[in-house]
Image: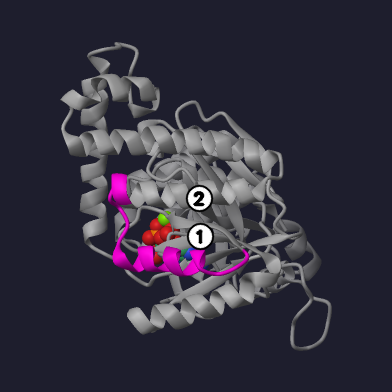
Amino acid sequence: MDQPAPPLADDPNAASDPAGTTETAPERLQRALSRHFETGPSPNSSDERASCVVAQAPGRVNLLGGHTDYSGGFVLPTTIDRAVYVALRASGDETVRLRSVDFDEDATFSLEAETAIEELPTWARYVAGVTAELRRRGYAPEGFEALIAGNVPLGAGLSSSAALEVATAVGLGELFSLGLGAVETARLCQRAEQEHVGVECGIMDQFSSHLGRAGHALFLDCRSLEHRHVPLPLAEDVCLVVADSGVRRELASSKYNERRRECEEAARFFAQFDASIESLRDVPEALIEKQGTELDDTLRRRARHVVSENERVERGATLLADGDLEAFGQLMNASHASLASGYEVSCAELDALVEIAQSVEGVLGTRMTGAGFGGCTVTLVRRDATEHLRRAMEARYRERFAPDLETYVVERNLKAGLL
Ligand code: ADP
Ligand code: MG
């Protein structure tokens, strides 16, 4: 992983500074902010605390609902115990001065000059994208100074980018009393990434980072944005283990676009029989069985995956709410099988990680998570089997592939907000 060591304690509220005082991570960030930006509106330290806000937003992992979002379907993500933290204070002018702790880099831009966003380092474009989208919606953030640090691994499919956007928006909302709604914030963060970073992301990442709740997964209807929180008793009996295959394939984005096109084409085919069908989300299974024989075999398999996966997400949310983790785990296994064979977005490395996990006692279910062709798997495992699972995955993956499997244990999930 190209991420430097995390600058914060795992628990951002834990007292852990070497001097042995009781300074918390938010206080450390505030102090670092004022040390770094020597000029500022608040020369004395108690004013400084009053004028500085620290926001956090977590990364996420998707438990069920692979490649359903762009067909207007259902997803079931949960936040993880890693986050991006942003400490901010007003600069008193139109200028935004940023410092990334993890990239060890500064960036400056003027709120008035949106055209300059593309000249900024990539990490700063996420922040500038958020300010631009706020302004586009009529909110008026003023200039500010911000220090950014995080421990969500970058580019691993755990959504560090959405965490950065959401932490920025939450912090600015507080600093300038913008009165932002949660769903509105998720949408404007999504748009910030699409418009100002150039990534055609769905809504799931920003939505789960901002609306995810501790102790819960989030059932989200990607079309209507209706959502509900479903209990996920992570701290008690089970953990999630995320395993990063280390594979990053160029192929991924072209195949992603190809799948999007295939879904649109399959939906158009089924719309001949029912004009109310807008996307594969609207196609009943019976229609695939009845009319699907006239459809190209590949497109039929894509349609079957999306329709069955949506059903798994709905069933999975009910099972989680009932506390039936065993049955939920089986749906994760079925989801992987469907993504691998019907939708064809897995790869040998992900299949091997799934196979290894499924052979470990105490594993309830496992699947690839994210767009596929590399990236991560997520495994639901009984708490007492977690270390055994990690060791088995690391050793057996190393035998077959590269030696660099990273695993992360998610013992609890964080919520976005102010620290
Ligand atoms: P993912 O969202 O899966 O982690 P992305 O490629 O979408 O991967 O986003 C990663 C990018 O987000 C990083 O390259 C960086 O520009 C930005 N980013 C994420 N976390 C941080 C951080 N802690 N500090 C600065 N930039 C960050
Ligand atoms: Mg991202």
- Residue at 83% across / 77% down in the picture? 22
Q: Residue tagged by mark 2? A: 332
The numbered mark at residue 298 is none
| Whether residue 198 can be seen here | no
- x then y, percent, for residue 168: 55, 53
Left or right: residue 245 versus residue 323 is left
Upstream in sequence: badge 1 or badge 2: 2
In this view of the protein, which residue sits in the foreground, 69 or 346? Answer: 346
237 relative position to 226: left or right:
right
Ligand 1 lies under 8 Å from the Cβ of mark 1: no
Q: Which residues are magenta?
A: 341-362
Q: Type of residue at label 2?
A: Met
Please tell me the numbered disc located at residue 378: 1
Does 29 sit above or below residue 125? below
Residue 355 is one of the magenta-drawn residues: yes
The relative height of residue 203 versus residue 249 in the rendered view (above or below) is above
User: Secondary structure under badge 2?
Assistant: helix
Q: CA separation, marks 1 and 2?
A: 9 Å
Outermost bottom residue: 19
Q: Which corner quadrant of the figure contains ligand 1? A: bottom left
Tell me which residue sits at (49%, 26%) in the image: 224
* Quadrant showing the C terminus: bottom right
In the image, is residue 14 above or below residue 418? below
Crowding near pointer 2: few (<14 within 10 Å), some, many (20+)? many
Pointer 1 with pointer 2, Cβ within 8 A: yes
Q: Residue at x 47, y 79 (%)?
A: 394
Q: Position of residue 246 (x, y in %)?
A: 37, 72
Q: Is residue 203 part of the magenta span, yes or no?
A: no
Could you tell me which residue is drawn at 42 percent across and 76 percent down?
A: 1
